[in-house]
Amino acid sequence: MWQTVLAVGVVIYLFLSLRIIKQYETLVVFFLGKYWKTKGAGPRFVFFIFQTSVRVDMRLRTMDIPKQQMMTKDNVPVTVNGVIYFKVFEAETAVIKIQDYGYAITQYAETALRDVIGSMSLDSVLAEREEVGEKIRETVAKETKGWGLTVDHIKLQDVEVPDDLKRLMSRQAAAEREKRATVIKAEGDRMAAENLQKAATIMAKQKGAMQLRTLQTIDGLGPTASNTVILAVPIELMDAIQAFTKKK
């Protein structure tokens, strides 16, 4: 009888000790409070009373860097938030050395974000988001070295500036666009004037060019009845006057 009870007790004990570890998980096992081994995916036994375990997710994780206000190098207040992408590559190190590695790495990212933004001007922050994120990533990776973690990316999500500064930036952008439009128009006028000057020089040298140009202009008016063309002086008379002037 006692053998049956013992067998049933052993079966129950083994059943309660069974752990199913998923493909993306790692099991860190402690024996009497001391690190024993790390187990991979599949059915694993953790004999309770003597052993304890911690599951660690080995997938890429994303955590928000909370929105916070800070000052840029040129004393402009901005509000910035971001996202940090990291994962665990040494489960036992992350569990043993860090109480809550997710919270800890987020705190480091917040500090690094303030330091990097504070060393840059507003224009640089707005124009170089990728570079800012990479600087923060390098800082966090250096500070968390030896934690069993790897920081893949840090991205800035929103960079908010005060409303009055937004209006100033909008006016500045409008002024820049107007300036470019004025320069382009002036350049076009200059090129048109040069072409007209060249055309006038060619027409003055070529005999009959002015008459041909006049006929082309008249022909371009089209056959519409509403178009009326009045030539005050015949072209032949103008040529005669010019010839007489040259003889004089």
Image (cartoon, helix red, strand yellow):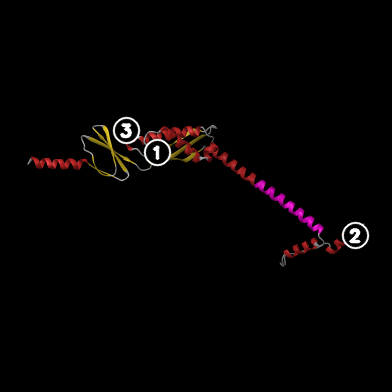
Range of magenta residues: 181-205
Mark found first going from the N terminus, 3 or 2: 3
Mark nearer the viewer, 3 or 2: 3
Q: Is residue 200 magenta?
A: yes
For the point 62% across and 43% down, the residue is: 176
Mark found first going from the N terminus, 1 or 3: 3
The residue lying toward the viewer, choosing from 146 and 245, is 146
Dominant secondary structure of the residues highlighted in magenta in the image: helix
Question: Circle 1 sits on which residue?
Answer: 150
Place residue 36 in its image quadrant.
Answer: top left
Q: Residues within 10 Å of mark 1 (few under 14, many from 20)?
A: some
C-alpha distance separating marks 3 and 2: 111 Å
C-alpha distance separating marks 1 and 3: 16 Å
Q: Which mark is residue 96?
A: 3
C-alpha distance separating marks 1 and 2: 95 Å
**Residue type, numbered disc 2:** Phe
**Residue type, numbered disc 1:** Thr
Residue 152 is left or right of residue 24, and the answer is right
Q: Position of residue 216 (x, y in %)?
A: 75, 63
